Each structure stands twice: as C-alpha cells, then as structure tokens.
Image (tube, helix red, strand yellow):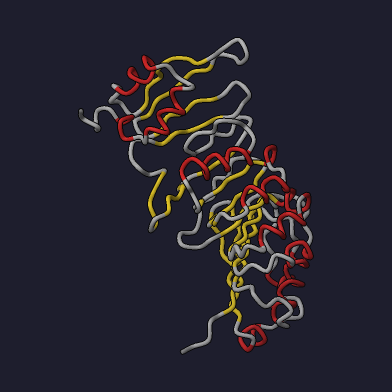
Amino acid sequence: MDRKRFPLLRLPIVVLTEILQIMTCVELFSFSLCSKKTKNIGKLGSKQSPTVDVNFDWRDFHFRLGNGISITMRFGSYDVLKKRGNNLVSEFVTISGNDSESIGLFAPNTKPIQWINHLRNLFGIQTIIRLNISNELFIPDSILNALSGLKIEALAITHRDPKPAFMEGISEVLIAEQLMKQYSKSVTALLGRRFPSLFLLGRGQVTMDEILICNCEHLHLLETSLTDKDINRLLKLWMRNVITDLRSIYLTNTTRKEAFDQYMILDGISYDQLFKAKFGLAFSHSPGKQHVHIYKTRPLP
C-alpha cells in the first residue's frame, strides 16, 4: 500500500494504538485519504468535554482537548522521532495550555511529569531537543523529577507559547522574567545542568542578582526591564572578572520609549578600558527596536 497516500502507515504501531484510543478507525481512514495540506475532518467530543473541530495536515495533525490543551501529532515523516546512535530522540516536545498551540507527538494526559514519563517509557527517548513548558503547567519539583536522567538541549519556560527563533547548535534556556523571579531556585537547579545560552523575556522586574546566579555563557535579554544603570553595573562586574563564564550579552527592546543610553551604559568606562579588557560593544537600531551587543572577544591565535 502506498505510504505516501496513507501517511498514517508511517507511524509506529504503538503510536497508532494510542491514536485509536482517541479516534475511530473510520475517522482515521477518512483523514488518511486527505491529500490537501490542511483539511477540517470532523469534530471530537463527549459528554465530559465539549465538541471541538479537528483539522488534519498531512504532516501535522492538530486537535484540542476539552480542557484547553492543544496537541499536534507530526507523522507525515519521521520528523518527530529520530535516531541518534541507538537512542530515539524527540525533536519537538511542547507542553502548553490555554489557547497556546503545542508541537509534540501526543499527550495522553495534561500533567507534564506523566507526559514526559510516557514519552520516555513508550519510546525509550533519552534526549529532548526542545522542551517548551508554559507557565500554567510549570510545577518546579515535578518537572525537575521528570527531567532527571534526560538530556535536554533547549528549554523554554514562558507565560505563553514562545516565538523567538532558537540559535542553531547552541543549547539554551528561555524564561519569562516574571518566572525567573517566581521560580529562581528551581531555575538555578535547571541551569545547573549547563544550558550555555539564557533568554529572558518580558518586563518582569528581574534583578541583576537573579541573573548573575545563572552562570550562562550567552545572555539574551528580550524586552528587558533592566535599566541602563543595571547594564552598566553588570558590565563593570564582568570587566573585573567577577562574572567568569559569560561570553556575550545581547539586549533588545521594542517597548521602552527611549533608546538605550550609550553614555549611561558606559558611565565610568572608556573604550580604551573595554579594549584592554578584550571587550566589544555595539549599538544598533532596526525599525521599532534598539539593540545592544556586549561581547568578550576571544584572544587572537
């Protein structure tokens, strides 16, 4: 039978078994025949949960559960499950709630710890390339226990589904600033697993001390609530080698009315001092945005 015409046949039998617990064979057959990229194939619902529309894509099958959790199953190719050596890895794993749309294999329940364990036990997954956890489902202790023994190359903990592009080849953690403050101890424990790159989103009044405990190599502050004085203090500590692991800081802002003040950031610091300390500093602008890039130059060979 042509697997290109019937993409469901590409799924492992264990995945089909899980899907059959949600949809009938007739529904599976009807959307297996679909050749268009996207098509509404019907509705799902029961007395316990409201009826929802089901849209089918030959690569991604999207549906929402009645409790607000949305799920995407990617089965048009083996994009979800890939082999690294003898280990299966999950390329996209997202746990999200409310109206966020998640990207993942499937979610048999709404509790992150059970869902992660299900992936691990069912497929033997040992590596998660990207794990996105929304705020409303982030339970620090449960997540830390669930992640124990797993290798996670990129983690996002946000108040909504994150959109910024990930840097290829760099492991990273992305956290909304208000969550950084709320879960500082748990975040520190997560970062102890060595995520070299840290993204902070939003204006959550995160403090400089909360940032400095992260020991990351690359710090990205997006829509940061840090002031120019905060950045000046961080730069001075960095130049005095109080901060040892940091290689670069990238700041961008679209909401503050005034641009980053170059003179305030460099208050008490000359360009000659920056040069001697092997630092680079760049200010740039794009439509509606101001950017500051501070980086430690690598010694010449």
Of all residues, the one furthest to the top in this rendering is 47
Return the residue nearer the eye: 217 or 95: 95
- For residue 41, what is the image quadrant? top left
Image location (x, y in percent) of residue 176 = 68, 49
Q: Quadrant of the N terminus?
A: top left
Residue 268: quadrant of the picture:
bottom right
- In this picture, residue 10 sits left or right of residue 195: left
Q: Residue at x 58, y 52 (%)?
A: 155
The residue most toward the left is 1
Q: Is residue 261 above or below residue 32?
A: below
Q: Is residue 300 above or below residue 116?
A: below
Query: Number of callouts in the render?
Result: 0
Measured from the top left, where is residue 196 in percent x and y? 58, 65
The residue sitting at 60% across, 84% down in the picture is 278
- Where is residue 99? Give x, y as percent: 60, 30
Q: Is residue 2 above or below residue 211?
A: above
Rendered residue at 48%/21% (across/down): 22
Residue 31: x %, y % from top left: 35, 21
Q: Residue at x 57, y 24 (%)?
A: 65
- Closer-to-camera residue (162/157): 157
